[in-house]
């Protein structure tokens, strides 16, 4: 008799724990909101501002390009620490933007440091490609957050 009671309690307890865990699962929208609130919002703004700065300084003398590109590279590093963006729609654009910003910034910094204007210019063009990818990612993120 004691064995049946123990088995029944164990099964009941297991079912109860499974039901509680299933009830606590986050929806994709909730996960995205958490990501956004825990740094995603700040990161998208910082990436937008610093990539815009790189674009802005591209018409100035090359000696100011490296610092702007280095700032963007630092923001990319921070953005990567947020982990994978929990939006299937925006993830590709987000990753493309980060990749373009990282590669472009590295080329810009290296080219500026070596006084290699063609290399630095190519890096800036890559950053400029990333700007449109970031804009698309942010648009999709906002749509997901608004429930569209």
Image: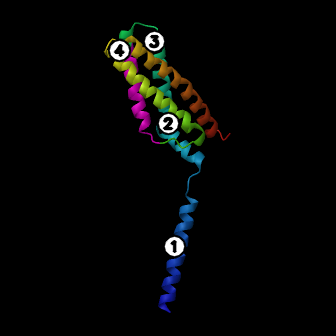
The residue positioned 56% from the left and 24% from the top of the image is: 132
Q: Main secondary structure of the magenta part?
A: helix
Residue, disc 4: 112
* Secondary structure of the residue carrying numbered label 2: helix
Q: State whether residue 139 is above or below residue 114.
A: below
Q: Nearer the viewer, mark 4 or mark 3?
A: 4
Q: Locate residue 33 relative to residue 71 in the image: left or right.
A: right
N-terminal-most mark, 4 or 3: 3
Residue 88: mark: none
19 left or right, relative to 116: right
Mark 3 or 1: in front is 3
Gap between marks 2 and 4, in whole Å?
30 Å
**1 or 2: tag closer to the N-terminus:** 1
Are discs 3 and 1 less than 8 Å apart at CB? Answer: no
Q: Is residue 75 magenta?
A: yes
Q: Which residue is mark 2?
A: 40
| Pair 2/3: label in front | 3
| Mark closest to the chain's N terminus, 2 or 3 | 2
Q: Which x, y percent locates residue 42?
A: 48, 32
Numbered mark located on residue 58 in the image:
3
Q: Nearer the viewer, residue 124 or 75?
A: 124
Q: Which mark is residue 14?
A: 1
Q: Measuring from the top left, give residue 120's x and y in whole percent.
A: 40, 16
Location of residue 58 by image quarter: top left
Q: Nearer the viewer, mark 2 or mark 4?
A: 4
């Amino acid at each position: 008799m004691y064995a049946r009671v123990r088995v029944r309690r164990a099964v009941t307890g297991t079912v109860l724990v499974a039901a509680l865990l299933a009830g606590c699962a986050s929806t994709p929208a909730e996960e995205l909101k958490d990501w956004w609130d825990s740094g995603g919002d700040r990161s998208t703004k910082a990436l937008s501002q610093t990539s815009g700065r790189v674009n802005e300084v591209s018409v100035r003398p090359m000696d100011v390009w490296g610092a702007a590109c280095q700032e963007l590279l630092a923001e990319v590093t921070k953005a990567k620490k947020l982990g994978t963006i929990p939006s299937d729609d925006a993830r590709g654009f987000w990753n493309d933007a980060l990749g373009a910003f990282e590669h472009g910034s590295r080329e810009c910094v290296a080219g500026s440091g070596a006084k290699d204007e063609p290399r630095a210019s190519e890096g800036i063009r890559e950053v400029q490609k990333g700007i449109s990818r970031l804009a698309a990612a942010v648009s999709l993120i906002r749509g997901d957050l608004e429930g569209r």
